[in-house]
Image (cartoon, rainbow, N blue to C red):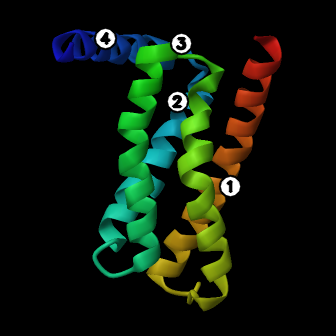
Amino acid sequence: MFTEFMDAWAIAQADQEVYIAALPQWVQLWMNWMLVVLGLGALIFAVFKVEARWLLLAMVLTIPATMVLGVYVGWNGLWGITHLILWTPVAIYMARRFSQIEVKSIYGVWYVMALATLWISLLFDVKDVGQYLLSA
């Protein structure tokens, strides 16, 4: 059974690459932006800041969650559901902590970019998941 799942995982990963390659250029650029700001930025600041640790945890959990979703339902507009589930609590947490952040610091600049990136991504995800569910 494990071997079957791993085979399905490999197929899902290949399908994901095809799906991403077919997306508009701006979406691919946006995904790269998210990877740098949310992923790399969180990794750098996680050593010092609790907010970055929570974001990094959400980012790390998103990878297997998204792949499992891809294994079972394929790559489509439902992809954003993993972001909605894992990123929304972090976005709310970070928004509530915003008043405690020194925005005129390197961390503060990253924090503002990360928070804005999270909320913009979540808006895209609401749109994509909603369209998928309404068309199903």
Whether 46 is drawn above or below 67: the answer is below
Residue at numbered disc 2: 28
Mark drawn on residue 8: 4
Can residue 50 be seen here? The reply is yes
List x then y, in percent, for residue 29.
53, 35
Q: Tag 1 or tag 2, which sits nearer the N-term?
A: 2
Q: Is mark 2 on a helix, strand or loop?
A: helix
Question: In the visual, does 114 lie left or right of 40?
Answer: right
Q: Quadrant of residue 116?
A: bottom right
Q: Tag 4 or tag 3, which sits nearer the N-term?
A: 4
Q: Tag 4 or tag 2, which sits nearer the N-term?
A: 4
Can residue 21 be seen here? The reply is no
Whether 94 is drawn above or below 76: the answer is below
Please report contact status of discs 3 and 4: CB closer than 8 Å, yes or no: no
Q: What element carries label 4?
A: helix
Q: Distance between the residues labelled 3 and 2?
A: 9 Å
Q: Quadrant of residue 15?
A: top left
Q: Is mark 3 on a helix, strand or loop?
A: helix
Whether 8 is drawn above or below 20: the answer is above
Residue at numbered disc 1: 119
Q: Mark 2 against mark 4, which lies toward the viewer?
A: 4
Mark drawn on residue 22: 3
Residue beneath the point at 42% across and 50% down: 59
Q: Tag 3 or tag 1, which sits nearer the N-term?
A: 3
Mark 4: few/some/many CA within 10 Å (<14, 14-19, 20+): some
Q: Tag 2 or tag 3, which sits nearer the N-term?
A: 3
List x then y, in percent, for residue 54.
44, 66
Q: Mark 3 against mark 4, which lies toward the viewer?
A: 4
Q: Which residue lies furthest to the right in this view?
A: 134
Q: Distance between the residues labelled 4 and 1?
A: 32 Å
Please report contact status of discs 4 and 1: CB closer than 8 Å, yes or no: no
Please report contact status of discs 2 and 1: CB closer than 8 Å, yes or no: no
